Image (cartoon, coloured by chain):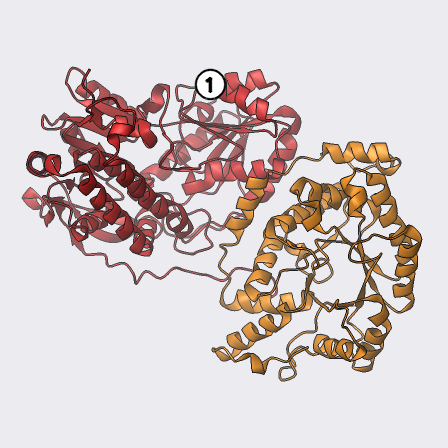
Chain colours: A red, B orange
């Protein structure tokens, strides 16, 4: 070796035991799907099949809802709040104990770097269970109103970008408030949800309180329309979210939606530039940009645009793209072929519309789904890449001249999930935050999450909040 | 960022004005960046490479009131031949001693074939810097006359903290002129006394503008010393100064770096901040005393596949 290169440092996969085939988790047991229909889940970094997954038919969904209904009526609604809390604490501890197993499995099924599953996804998932375990017997003090009652059976549909973490965002508050659950993980990332089913068994959670059914969009649609469901919680695309809102209108079902975004990351000229560059990188390249709250629009004040862009390029050249299981990998695989094609299509639109594309030199692996970290400069509001969610490692750089213009451009989108503000002036942070129409606003940081902090969107980014006391209120009915 | 011009350093007012235009450092961001880089996993061939590189970068140091000629000679032996059983171990970057020990160190190094190992002297009323300029000049001249080829000077932190940047600047410039072609100048900030990262950034530019060849974190007498975020800020400064002027300034963290793990984290910081051009003893040094033995122990472990007791590593 003549220069300082990082030798491969792969995390061992021996800790995970992936079965060749998985059933549906209904009423505390793994059962085969009716009709025996299955689909495959693959490792997006290698395109190798990981396991055969059962496809839940309508009658399987019926069974799962029936099990959840039964468990709600006979067991869970009669379980004392402190007992509910105990189960949640137990689940949280098991998640911590089996953290490495979950981290490796998540990385294999999703394609995200082991560094992120190890340091972000799994610790945060456990934190959500710990946080909500504490609330279970203190709901009267959560400011939810008097006599807050659970809805009953909640149907939950989660995306593929943070599989276990989104599961915990959904299941932890539902159980803490006394609901039972039928959850459908995403088609391309079911494995950690199925491992979580094992955790429920290990924790001795009463049968039927958590049911996990695997399938595709049709399975989800049937679940949404099921008359036995009292509340729907969905995280995913705005398009599907709109469909769900239409489907349940006129019913008594409660609904929370956590949808897409096109977050504006605003860098003022008085920002701490080096740290802002780090924030830009983590804002768009964290989790391959598969983040609904990603800072996918970089709004740069014109008088520092050149300097920041140059520094950003130098920094991007250091991003290590490759084997998600290597502990030094910063950017992993794109989750699926379909997603890769979507990213390619929108990037091509950026080229066609005249924005300037730039990516650092990097060698992408031969198999699997990959996309280089990419920036587009010279983007204007009228470009598709300034408006549409790409959901990949692609950043659109837009410039502005004054703070007023920054806010106008930031808000000029049908979305309203996240925004970032970079300035050393506290007064400018407050001024900007008051004017930004976004559910979560970070100042001098980006993509930081905490179970105590509510998360959710304005406009087409969704309804309702998850996390914190606000998130709890979505899982209870309050007598008016 | 503005370009460096001659007028910039003409007056204290213009210097102050320039320092004020430097972008601020966000403490939380700088600390989280170094925490992220600390998770890099350096194994096998990269660890072997890093250990030898770190050995070549060590400024093997003794700065004690109890230093004697015997102690200095032992240190020099160790510097030239860190592991007597293994001739593939490179010599260290330099030995670093007090002024009165410089001639002893130089003579002994030369007598054992250590011509390539420079002697660094700590100067300008080290470690506090609290003396008149006359004394500081005399102190430095003394070290140079004794054969020091590297001068580690301390800045006047009192002057810096009270905003008398011009004084700090002039003093560095003066010592640099004294060093001339004879010696490299390292400028010590004592970052544990400057406290904020903004101050570290300002001090870095002040020293670089005044002609420092190296900027150095600490004397080793004040804690905290070479913390990762402080080194990050200094590496950013030399990187950006290079883009402005085309001149590469070295960085020397000193104090608190005791283990191979710590040293490798420093190398990762260099690699991913200033860049691989800085991964050479002429641009990066680590001021340490205990570190060398840990590096040697890890080196043996990599070679033999198991750890040996500390009895297999020589005292210095």
The residue at the point 85 percent across, 77 percent down is B107
Q: Quadrant of residue B50?
A: bottom right
Q: In the rendered view of the protein, which quadrant contains the C terminus of chain A? A: top left
Q: Quadrant of residue A25?
A: top left
Q: Is residue A256 left or right of residue B114?
A: left
Mark 1 surroundings: few (<14), some (14-19) or many (≥20) residues within 10 A: some
Q: Nearer the viewer, residue A233 or B65?
A: B65
Q: Nearer the viewer, residue B230 or B220?
A: B220
Q: Is residue B276 above or below residue A331?
A: below
> Where is residue A58 shown, x and y percent of the image?
9, 34
How many labels were placed on the picture?
A: 1
> Where is residue A312 shown, x and y percent of the image?
58, 38
The residue at the point 47 percent across, 20 percent down is A436
Q: In the rendered view of the protein, which quadrant contains the N terminus of chain A? A: bottom right
> Where is residue B197 shown, x and y percent of the image?
65, 43
Residue A331 in sight from this viewpoint: yes
* Numbered disc 1: secondary structure: helix
Q: Is residue B311 left or right of residue A129?
A: right
> Where is residue B267 shown, x and y percent of the image?
60, 58
Q: Nearer the viewer, residue B259 or A258?
A: B259
Q: Is residue B269 above or below residue B73?
A: above
Q: Nearer the viewer, residue A122 or A469?
A: A469
* Chain to which mark 1 belongs: A
The residue at the point 74 percent across, 61 percent down is B282
User: Of all residues shown, which one is farthest toward the bottom?
Assistant: B85
Residue B180 in sight from this viewpoint: no
Q: Is residue A133 above or below residue A104?
A: above
The residue at the point 65 percent across, 83 percent down is B84
Q: Is residue B153 left or right of residue A145?
A: right
The residue under label 1 is A411
């Amino acid at each position: 070796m003549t220069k300082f290169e990082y030798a491969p440092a792969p995390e061992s996969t021996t800790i995970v035991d992936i079965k060749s085939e998985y059933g549906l988790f209904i009423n505390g047991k793994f059962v085969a799907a009716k009709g025996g229909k299955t689909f495959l889940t693959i490792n997006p970094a290698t395109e190798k099949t990981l396991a055969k997954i059962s496809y839940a038919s309508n009658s399987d969904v019926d069974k799962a809802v029936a099990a959840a209904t039964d468990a709600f009526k006979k067991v869970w609604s009669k379980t004392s709040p402190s007992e509910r809390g105990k189960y949640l604490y137990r689940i949280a501890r098991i998640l911590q104990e089996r953290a490495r197993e979950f981290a490796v499995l998540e990385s294999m099924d999703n394609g995200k770097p082991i560094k992120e599953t190890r340091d972000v996804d799994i610790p945060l998932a456990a934190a959500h269970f710990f946080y909500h375990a504490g609330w279970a017997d203190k709901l009267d003090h959560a400011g939810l109103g008097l006599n807050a009652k659970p809805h009953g059976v909640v149907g939950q549909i989660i995306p593929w970008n943070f599989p276990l973490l989104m599961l915990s965002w959904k299941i932890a508050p539902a159980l803490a408030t006394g609901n039972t659950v039928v959850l459908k993980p995403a088609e391309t990332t079911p494995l950690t949800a199925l491992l979580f089913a094992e955790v429920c068994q290990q924790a001795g959670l009463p049968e039927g309180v958590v049911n996990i059914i695997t399938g595709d969009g049709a399975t989800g649609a049937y679940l949404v329309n099921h008359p036995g469901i009292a509340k729907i919680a969905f995280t995913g695309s705005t398009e599907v979210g709109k469909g769900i809102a239409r489907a349940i209108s006129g019913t008594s079902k409660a609904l929370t939606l956590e949808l897409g975004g096109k977050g504006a990351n605003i860098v003022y000229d008085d920002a701490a530039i080096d740290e802002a560059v780090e924030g830009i990188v983590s804002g768009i390249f964290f989790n391959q940009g598969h983040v609904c709250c990603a800072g996918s629009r970089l709004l740069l004040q014109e008088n520092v645009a050149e300097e920041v862009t140059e520094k950003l390029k130098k920094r991007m050249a250091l991003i290590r793209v490759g084997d998600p299981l290597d502990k030094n990998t910063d950017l992993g695989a794109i989750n699926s072929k379909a997603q890769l094609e979507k990213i390619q299509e929108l990037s091509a639109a950026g080229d066609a519309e005249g924005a300037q594309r730039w990516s650092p030199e990097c060698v992408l692996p031969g198999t699997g789904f990959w996309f280089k970290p990419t920036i587009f400069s010279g983007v204007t509001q009228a470009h598709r890449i300034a408006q549409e969610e790409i959901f990949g490692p692609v950043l659109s750089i837009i410039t502005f001249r004054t703070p007023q213009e920054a806010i106008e451009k930031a808000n000029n989108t049908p979305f309203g999930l996240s925004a970032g503000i970079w300035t050393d002036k506290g007064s400018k942070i407050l001024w900007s935050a008051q004017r930004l129409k976004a559910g979560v606003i970070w100042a001098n940081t980006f993509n930081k999450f905490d179970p105590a902090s509510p998360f959710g969107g304005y406009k087409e980014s969704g309804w309702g909040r998850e996390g914190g006391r606000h998130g709890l209120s979505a899982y209870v009915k309050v007598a008016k | 960022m503005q370009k460096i011009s001659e007028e910039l350093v003409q007056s204290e007012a213009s210097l102050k004005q320039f320092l004020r235009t430097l972008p601020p450092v966000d403490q939380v961001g700088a600390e989280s960046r170094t925490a992220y880089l600390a998770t890099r996993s350096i194994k096998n061939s990269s660890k072997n490479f890093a250990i030898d590189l770190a050995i070549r970068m060590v400024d093997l140091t003794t700065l004690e009131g109890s230093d004697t000629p015997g102690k200095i000679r032992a240190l020099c032996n160790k510097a030239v031949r860190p592991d007597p059983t293994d001739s593939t171990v490179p010599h260290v970057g330099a030995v670093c001693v007090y002024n009165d020990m410089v001639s002893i160190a130089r003579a002994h190094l030369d007598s054992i074939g250590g011509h390539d190992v420079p002697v660094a002297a700590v100067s300008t009323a080290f470690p506090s810097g609290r003396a008149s300029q006359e004394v500081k000049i005399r102190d430095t001249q003394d070290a140079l006359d004794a054969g020091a080829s590297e001068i580690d000077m301390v800045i006047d932190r009192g002057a810096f903290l009270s905003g008398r940047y011009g004084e700090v600047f002039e003093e560095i410039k003066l010592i640099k002129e004294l060093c001339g072609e004879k010696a490299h100048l390292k400028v010590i900030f004592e970052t544990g006394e400057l406290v904020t990262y903004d101050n570290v950034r300002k001090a870095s530019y002040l020293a670089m503008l005044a002609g420092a060849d190296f900027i150095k974190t600490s004397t080793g007498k004040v804690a905290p010393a070479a913390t990762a975020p402080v080194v990050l800020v200094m590496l950013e400064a030399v990187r950006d100064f290079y883009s402005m002027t085309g001149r590469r300034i070295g960085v020397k963290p000193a104090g608190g770096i005791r283990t191979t793990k710590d040293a490798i984290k420093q190398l990762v910081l260099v690699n991913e901040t200033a860049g691989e051009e800085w991964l050479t003893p002429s641009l990066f040094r680590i001021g340490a005393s205990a570190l060398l033995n840990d590096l040697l122990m890890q080196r043996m472990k990599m070679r033999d596949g198991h750890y040996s007791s500390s009895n297999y590593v020589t005292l210095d």
